[in-house]
Amino acid sequence: PSAVPPEWSLGESPAGEEQDKQNANSQLSTLFVEKPQTGSVKVGENITFIAKVKAEDLLRKPTIKWFKGKWMDLASKAGKHLQLKETFERQTRMYTFEMQIIKAKENYAGNYRCEVTYKDKFDSCTFDLEVHESTGTTPNIDIRSAFKRRKWVPLAAREAGAAPDSGPSPGREVKQQEEEPEVDVWELLKNANPNEYEKIAFQYGITDLRGMLKRLKRMRRVEKKSAAFAKILDPAYQVDKGGRVRFAVELADPKLEVKWYKNGQEIRPSTKYIFEHKGCERIMFINNCGLTDDSEYYVTAGDEKCSTELFVREPPILVTKQLEDTNAYCGERVELECEVSEDDANVKWFKNGEEIIPGPRSRYRIKVEGKKHILIIEGATKADSAEYSVMTTGGQSSAKLSVDLKPLKILTPLTDQTVHLGKEICLKCEISENISGKWTKNGLPIQESDRLKVVHKGRIHKLVIANALLEDEGDYVFAPDAYSITLPAKVHVIDPPKIILDGLDADNTVTVIAGSKLRLEIPISGEPPPKAIWSRADKAIMEGSGRIRAESYPDSSTLVIDVAERDDSGVYHINLKNEAGEAHASIKIKVVDIPDPPVAPKVTDVGDDWCIMNWEPPAYDGGSPILGYFIERKKKQSSRWMRLNFDLCKETTFEPKKMIEGVAYEVRIFAVNAIGISKPSMPSKPFVPLAVTSPPTLLTVDSVTDTTVTMKWRWLCARVLL
């Protein structure tokens, strides 16, 4: 018969998971715009389930998976009966995902699940498929009631109205008509749906189903009307193993020679094969029928022949030791045992009426030891709670298996952890049973990744996170499957404080102009956020409203100086501290200003319209090197000063020119640095430019005495320096 793919009968949602399905459907959808809905279909028809996801906030296509039951991924089952399709509508930015089931079969019914994921988002929904029988399918046949054992009754007993149980007689044997119409196995096979062939073969002890079907096909041929036979053999005969069968034909001409054949070999009379001639009737009896007698037979008369099939049915197999109700705990090995009447008999096992088919992917294993048949379930779960039954050709037995949760003990609980940023996080617990479980963080399922691994080894469960990040901090919970127990733990990620001085120069110096406002913002890091303390000369700078104050922010600390003064220059210290450690740094603040005024210049020499002046640099250069000087002069009696140079004088000496001879002047100096021009110096002492005195002329001796000589000459008055 046409076998249904075994995977479609696997993975059905167990009754114990109904609550999980309801909880999944009750959660608020985060990705689905339209969810697949529960549907029904008739056998042989098609049905399509549709899910839609809006792509407005998605940078790439989400990942979707379709499941049957709890675990079976349908992506690997796509083919003749299952097709998966996806489309994208650009205008509406809508992803549409379709799952189409083609020519549905009854065992396609069950619970399905659709899951969609995008980065850290996850959405899931469940739906059911119901498959109903088509109104045009072949009606079920009550095989056991239709197939009757033949009752052999002597001819004399039949004529006398003897009961079927009167016992055999050496006389002529005929079949006793029962009150219910008798239907043999051939009639069942000819009228049954091909899907029923295997069941009929099992229940009625047919071991060679393939050969039987070939012979059934030959039987359906229409026999031509025979000139040699007035009555031909029946299409088929059936007999129990060890029983006796009678073949009979009636000849049109009693003089014709008759020969009997089995599989083409002529049959000779013996104690097993007995031949009788009664008028035109030719009879062959086969005694003590065995499985070797299950074959094709034909009889020839002249040039014609007619054929039949004999099927030998083994005696029914009885269940001699019944199954017993069993209680077990989850995870235990369960053995359901029965005994039958024959060694190595064919026995079928069922769970809630569905046949159990062992295989590499099946959780069930069947062991046969002579007459003993054992169904083994390794690692039983609550889903294995059901009614199990065995069926033989002559009986059946059933029992209930109840699987409950074994009391769970927490051998090693999860513990709260504090880890440094970038280090490994390892949450570990041990429970008393080897069962799976689920991890959550802040109430959301944890998805494995290259950095995050979930480990289950025996009774030990571990969650390992490499290179801890700040977002790994949270409340973690491990929940063993099927239990209401949870194991919580808190993870606290810490990071030692760090002071980031990348924006400063090599010696961490900050320059500020006197009178301006300094707002020095220093980036900091650390988890938890560290506390920052500023200080100068061992004196803490407090937060508040002072001229010099500190301000704290989550990712920075700021030193504020309103209206910077010369005395604010110096070394400032910043200290950070949190539970992971401390950090320190020193910053030099330099307040720069205009230079102090130079001292009053000195005029060291004068000419008729010039003079030479020099001076000393100012005592304080303002914290910035002196770039040069400006020189101004004015007449002593005037109040208007005049700038003598527009390019800075780099030296401390200068020669003013173009002055009026005989007029008193004063000069003063301005010092210049990068910040600006100083206040003027005090004026110099007044001076009068004069020309150089001429040599004396007209030198004469006026008078001479014994002790003196009087001389006379003409001379110009020398210059006067006031």
Image: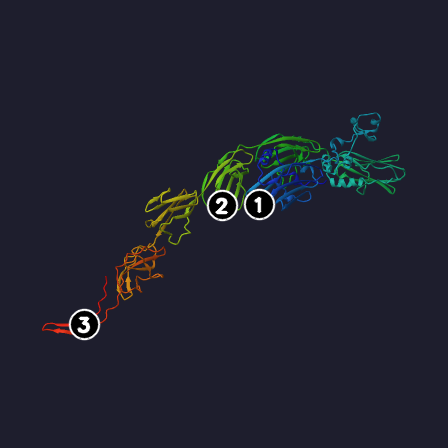
Query: Closer to us: mark 3 or mark 1?
Result: 3
User: Mark 1 highlights which residue?
Assistant: 58
Q: Position of residue 250 (x, y in %)?
A: 87, 36
Q: How is the image coloured?
A: rainbow
171 up-or-down from 301: above or below: above
Mark found first going from the N terminus, 2 or 1: 1
Kind of residue at badge 2: Ala
Q: Position of residue 343 (x, y in %)?
A: 67, 35
Q: Is residue 384 left or right of residue 557?
A: right
User: Mark 2 highlights which residue?
Assistant: 466
Q: Secondary structure at mark 1?
A: loop
Q: Is residue 406 left or right of residue 88?
A: left
| Farthest left residue in view | 706
In the rendered image, the quadrant that contains the N terminus is top right
User: Mark 3 highlights which residue?
Assistant: 713
The reply to whether residue 288 is in sight is no
Q: Position of residue 693 (x, y in %)?
A: 23, 69
Residue sitting nearer the eye, 432 or 560? 560
